[in-house]
């Protein structure tokens, strides 16, 4: 089981050593000190921030930033310099298309039939007419991409985001979204399908290319934030949480009907009666 | 069938009656949308237009000062620390805030070319109107940008910009708040940091 897990689940081995390293850093850095009780506004703010292990999070933020500066950002800049826009968009589209099973599962779990339908149509259209997902032709046909993940599925069920976590490699998160990430990875058929060196290599390539592709897209905004924020860590924390809340609101408000145009409407008449 | 029709008509009538007192709201929405349309078009004209970065910076700065309630945003961003700040410090802070805001926005917009924006719907939010727009740039996905407009009917001013669900003023406030907490809540430290930032990013 252990061997199977580590060979098929691309991050399992590294997660273990990172967790160990993480525990050591937690021991070193410790927890945030709460403000004195006689300052109610400061106390309220401290509770609202919900970042009890802030010093530890900041250590990981510093480590990730150093890794990013040394490795991921330069690679992403090279990727941008080498490949033209059309190719980069195509690669990103292929990666999005590969994420269909997980996205569809979450569309269903959040009870959004229209989103599930769009995700399915996108997969069939883009995998065929879109040449294995390279071209997003489905978007032009009205099947727009929607974002979802198991963290949002949990949020939709009322699970709170919990204390803020800045994770090694993965970046901003929290217990709910971290659980979502692990569940999504485990639920991804590509994690389990096939075996042998080629499959493992493909799995790793997907993870690597995905990281570079995503990083390339945010090169400019991240640079901008680092340049303009007095405390980039706090700014990323705020942005991450606002973004997740906005995604949840978008999900909750997406109640588009699934009724086909030929279906009799409520007044007992047909809109667009089918041609005879 | 006829019954249902009659019911529908009655429902429509009731809907229209309910909408009547809301005509002030409709007017506010219209005014706010028109205001964002004019401001947006002016910004896009500068961003896409010719001119050196310095010229653009100057022009964008003028548009921001005219369209944004900079002092209100500045006060909001200082949050609970505003009241602990002396009038002199408040004055210095607001002047610096305006400078940093213009610099940051110009830095963000300055490199863009071929920007397009589409006006969406306006919706009321407390006393304000939120005007939705979609901003498009070459080679990036369209972004939803909401503009919060205060006093839409009398003297419309922008008090927040919400890009893809993230509010500019809330993000800025958390940045300042975190900086203050890590510097013994010292307003002077914040002012010094803002000053060096304004110089650095110019």
Image: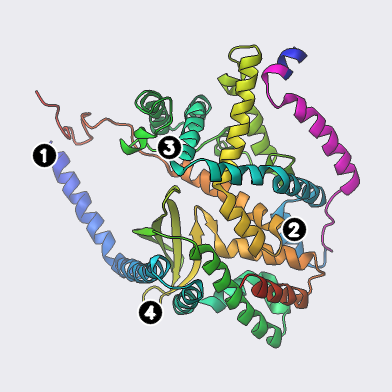
The residue positioned 42% from the left and 60% from the top of the image is B113
Q: Identify residue for label 4.
A: B154
Image marks 4 and 2: residues in contact by CB distance under 8 Å: no
Depth check: B83 or A28 in front?
A: A28
Please tell me how many numbered marks the rendered image carries.
Answer: 4
Depth check: A85 or B197 in front?
A: A85
Q: Residue furthest bottom?
A: B88
The residue positioned 46% from the left and 37% from the top of the image is A87
Subunit ID for the residue under disc 3: A
Q: Identify residue for label 1.
A: B2
Tell me the CA gap for discs 4 and 1. Answer: 47 Å
Subunit ID for the residue under disc 2: A
Depth check: B191 or A51 in front?
A: B191
The residue positioned 44% from the left and 44% from the top of the image is A253
Same chain check for tags 1 and 2: no
Q: Which mark is residue A145?
A: 3
Same chain check for tags 2 and 3: yes
Quadrant position of the N terminus of chain A in the picture:
top right
Taking the image as shown, residue B39 lies to the left or right of residue A105, namely left
Q: Upstream in the sequence, badge 4 or badge 1? A: 1
Q: Which residues are magenta?
A: A7-36
Q: Which mark is residue A46?
A: 2
Subunit ID for the residue under disc 4: B
Tell me the CA gap for discs 1 and 2. Answer: 62 Å
Image marks 2 and 3: residues in contact by CB distance under 8 Å: no
């Amino acid at each position: 089981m252990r061997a199977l897990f580590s060979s098929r689940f691309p991050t399992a081995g590294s997660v273990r050593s990172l967790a160990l390293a993480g525990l050591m850093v937690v021991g070193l850095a410790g927890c945030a000190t709460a403000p004195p009780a006689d300052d109610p506004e400061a106390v309220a703010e401290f509770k609202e921030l919900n970042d009890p292990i802030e010093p530890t999070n900041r250590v990981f933020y510093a480590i990730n930033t150093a890794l990013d500066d040394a490795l991921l950002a330069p690679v992403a800049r090279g990727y941008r310099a080498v490949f033209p826009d059309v190719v980069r968009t195509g690669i990103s589209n292929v990666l999005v298309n590969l994420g269909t099973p997980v996205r569809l599962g979450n569309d269903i779990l959040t009870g959004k039939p229209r989103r599930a339908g769009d995700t399915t149509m996108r997969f069939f259209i883009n995998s065929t007419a879109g040449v294995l997902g390279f071209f997003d032709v489905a978007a032009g046909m009205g099947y727009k991409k929607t974002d979802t993940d198991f963290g949002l599925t949990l949020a939709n069920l009322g699970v709170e985001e919990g204390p803020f976590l800045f994770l090694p490699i993965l970046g901003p998160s929290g217990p709910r979204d971290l659980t979502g990430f692990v569940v999504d990875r485990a639920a991804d058929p590509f994690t389990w399908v096939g075996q042998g060196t080629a499959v493992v290599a493909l799995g790793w390539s997907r993870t690597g290319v995905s990281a570079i592709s995503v990083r390339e897209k945010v090169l400019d905004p991240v640079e901008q934030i680092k340049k303009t924020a007095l405390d980039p860590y706090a700014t990323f924390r705020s942005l991450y949480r606002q973004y997740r809340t906005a995604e949840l609101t978008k999900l909750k408000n997406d109640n588009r009907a699934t009724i086909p145009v030929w279906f009799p409407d409520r007044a007992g008449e047909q809109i667009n009666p089918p041609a005879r | 069938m006829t019954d249902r029709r009659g019911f529908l008509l009655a429902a429509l009538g009731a809907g229209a009656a309910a909408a009547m007192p809301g005509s002030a709201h409709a007017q506010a929405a219209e005014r706010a949308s028109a205001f964002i349309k004019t401001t947006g078009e002016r910004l896009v004209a500068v961003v896409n237009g010719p001119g050196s970065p310095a010229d653009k910076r100057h022009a964008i700065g003028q548009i921001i000062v005219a369209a944004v309630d900079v002092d209100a945003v500045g006060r909001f961003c200082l949050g609970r620390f505003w009241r602990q700040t002396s009038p002199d410090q408040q004055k210095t802070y607001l002047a610096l805030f305006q400078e940093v805001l213009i610099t940051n926005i110009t830095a963000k917009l300055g490199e863009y070319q071929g920007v397009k924006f589409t006006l969406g719907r306006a919706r009321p939010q407390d006393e304000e109107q939120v005007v939705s727009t979609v901003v498009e740039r070459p080679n990036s996905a369209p972004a939803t940008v909401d503009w919060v407009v205060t006093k839409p009917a009398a003297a419309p001013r922008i008090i927040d910009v919400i890009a893809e669900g993230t509010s500019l003023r809330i993000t800025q406030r958390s940045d300042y708040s975190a900086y203050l907490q890590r510097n013994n809540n010292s307003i002077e430290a914040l002012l010094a940091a803002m000053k060096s930032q304004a110089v650095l990013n110019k």
